[in-house]
Amino acid sequence: MFSAFINSFKIKELRQRILFTLGVVFLCRLLANIPIAGIDFGLLSEWIASRQSNGGVMDMLNIFSGGALQRCAVGALGIMPYISASIILQLSSPVIPYLARLSKDGEAGRAKITQYTRYLTVLLCLVQGFAMVRTIQYGAVLPEGIVRIPGIGFTLLSLMTLTTGTLLMMWLGEQITERGIGNGISMIITVNIISRLPVAVGAMIQMFKPVDGIVRHSPFMLAAMLLMLLFVIAGAIAVTQAMQKVPVQYAKRVVGKKVYGGQHTYMPMKVNQAGVMPIILGSMMLTFPPMIFNMLPGTFFKPWAAALQSGTPAYMIVFALVILFFSYFWVTIQFNPIEIADNLKKGGGYIPGVRPGQPTAEFLDRVMTRLTLAGAIFLTIIALAPTIISKQFGVPFIVAQFFGGTSLLIMVGVMLDTMRQIESHLLMRHYDGFLKKGKLKSGRR
């Protein structure tokens, strides 16, 4: 594997792509560390040092932004408005006929959808940025005096800065996709998550330091945590890569003197077809009920709002049910067994033992339903693991987040995709990939 990394820099095109990606990542990290104008950064740093995370959605967004949200940085909104806009348009495509036609209209339709996604990103940036700026100036969370000169001027300047920062990160992500090693948007999120690793390591070291001569956690717990981390990462890789291969046979066709078809292949059906989307959608959705209940008059809904706070048993039960729902909902949108069965029938393909047409669609639907259940259970366990570890064992949430949750799935998925991208370049230049010892198979460059 190390030889494969070394060989990656021997190929000129791949070396340029890797260096370009590293340069863009450096610019993204700058955006996550430069505070917006008018903020007392010293007072903000003191508040950050005294604050304890509780695993809520704001902590998740802060991890996705690489700590930029806590720092009130230029890239505080991160790339999440763009991802939210993409999700909204994908969910709207089956409902809005115009978007459904665009999604089937080839390259021109995808370009139009991308344009609408950017427009919606700007709108979401303005809405989220305004909420953030209002919280900074008049909220009870941040200390008083953190904004030097509050008012309409600070609001407009901050809105422009935050929106520009998100759009710039979106453009940089597209540049990584086109001129780098691919997966630009996911790469930025992954780098932001990894940037929080030193903070997590520091918090873990503090866990095992004696306080007033008393050791709160034993070394055996450290060994158990490291062993658990290896098992969780191995499980995440296994489920992310897991798929069921449905055999497909194509009938032979004789056209003139040539014979077409007759080949045997398979249809890959992933266990975790929905990816991390159910966790993201569930986390976002559960932020609204407590806010709505707290705004309602009277005291009847106040216990409900307290019960649905992050980390409570009711919150985890509802969160698990929401993840299960969105797992099936997302697969229903992305996977159309009727369309797949029709395409197989038109192409002369069939699944052995299953009649073409409607029986094939029903068979594919049953298979995907069982696979989705296994993937949804896995997502539920991964999503709840950080909260359970943090609450039950007294582990800081920033540490527990690397033992599960959305961040771990994103890191595993993006790293696997990146390794595939690099490996394809290595194999094209007659180098071995990451699965074998990297060596030069031919003297040709």
Image (cartoon, grey):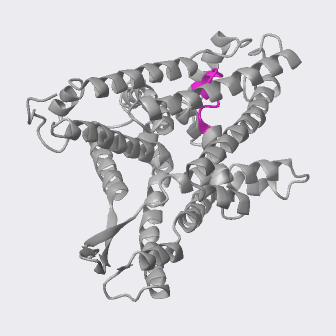
Q: Main secondary structure of the magenta part?
A: loop
The residue positioned 18% from the left and 28% from the top of the image is 7
Given the current orientation, which residue lies at the most extreme front position? 256
Instruction: Say if 111 sits above or below 267 in the image.
Output: above
Q: Determine whether, in the image, residue 278 is placed left or right of residue 201.
A: right
Q: Determine whether, in the image, residue 51 is placed left or right of residue 229.
A: right
Q: Determine whether, in the image, residue 444 is placed left or right of residue 224.
A: left
Q: Quadrant of the N terminus?
A: top left
Q: Residue 151 in the image: x percent, y percent? A: 87, 17
Given the current orientation, which residue lies at the most extreme right position? 297
Q: Determine whether, in the image, residue 67 is placed left or right of residue 7.
A: right
Q: Residue 217 in the image: x percent, y percent? A: 36, 37
Residue interval drawn in magenta: 68-80
The residue positioned 45% from the left and 51% from the top of the image is 385
Residue 72 located within the stretch drawn in magenta: yes
Task: Specify the quadrant of the image occupied by residue 248.
Answer: bottom left
